[in-house]
Amino acid sequence: MPKMKLHIYIILTFFTVFSGYAQKIANAKIADTIIVADYEFKPLSPARAAFYSAVLPGLGQAFNKKYWKIPVVWAAMGSGIYFYHTNNDNFKRARTAYKFRINEKPDEFDGLNGNIFLSKDALVSAQKSYKKDRDLSLLVTVGLYILQIVEASVNAHLLQLNVDSNLSVSPQIIHNDLNNKPIVGTSINFNF
């Protein structure tokens, strides 16, 4: 009986192996030449793009030939600088008025000659608020500066990836012929 089981196992293995080879085999021809891709791999390209962006914001994006990103970078940097400058000027105005108020001299917020009246406590509160907003504007501007450097470097890395049509995933729904239910599965095909 054990020999019978062994023979059945060998026969089943034999048919299983050869049924695996029953699939359609593509005729592959090996060429004598090496096909070179259309693109050229430049390993220092991401570092160069990051360096250019560090020197002048937007220059790394121009190096990557993503010209539409330059106005976005400049607008982001310009708005951060604008808010920093505005909050710094207002902080200086409130600080100068507070110094004049302490020395009992007229200032622009003393309520005389049609000026707006602000108390000493309001001037102190304005200084704190403008200083906090100024510091936040500086932090956001520095963050945007670093972000555009990182973006230029990452974009240069991604530009070096091979994304031609031979590397694609095309999902398909396959129906079972016996019960017409969909078969769930995943398949990745590489075309050479």
Image (spheres, helix red, strand yellow):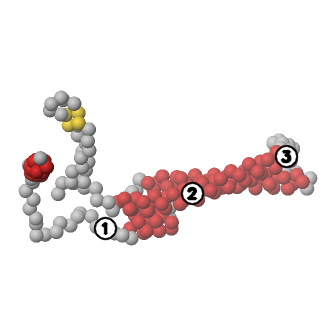
- Work out whether mark 3 precedes mark 2 in sequence or the reverse, and give the earlier one: 3
- Work out whether mark 2 precedes mark 1 in sequence or the reverse, and give the earlier one: 1
Q: CA distance from mark 2 to mark 1?
A: 30 Å
Task: Rate crowding at label 3 as few (under 14), some (14 to 19) or many (20 or more) other CA atoms within 10 Å.
Answer: few
Q: Residue 40: give x, y in percent of width and height.
A: 28, 67
Task: Rate crowding at label 1 as few (under 14), some (14 to 19) or many (20 or more) other CA atoms within 10 Å.
Answer: few
Q: Residue 161: give x, y in percent of width and height.
A: 32, 60
Say whether marks 1 and 3 touch (CB < 8 Å).
no
Q: Residue at x 33, y 62 (%)?
A: 160
Q: Point out the frontmost of discs 1 and 3.
A: 1
Number of marks in the image?
3
Q: Helix, strand, or loop for circle 1?
A: loop
Q: Point out the frontmost of discs 3 and 2.
A: 2
Q: Residue 136: give x, y in percent of width and height.
A: 65, 53
- Work out whether mark 1 precedes mark 3 in sequence or the reverse, and give the earlier one: 1
Say whether marks 2 and 1 touch (CB < 8 Å).
no
Quarter placement of the C terminus: bottom left
Residue behind mark 1 = 41
Q: CA distance from mark 3 to mark 2?
A: 33 Å
Q: Residue at x 18, y 54 (%)?
A: 191
Using the image as rendered, state which of residue 135 and residue 99 is in the foreground. 135
Residue behind mark 2 = 143
Q: CA distance from mark 1 to mark 3?
A: 63 Å
Q: Which mark is residue 126?
A: none
Question: Label 2 is placed on what type of residue?
Answer: Gly
Which quadrant holds residue 145?
A: bottom right
Question: Label 3 is placed on what type of residue?
Answer: Asp
Q: Is residue 189 above or below residue 51?
A: above
Residue behind mark 3 = 121
Q: Helix, strand, or loop for circle 3?
A: helix
Q: Is residue 87 visible?
A: no
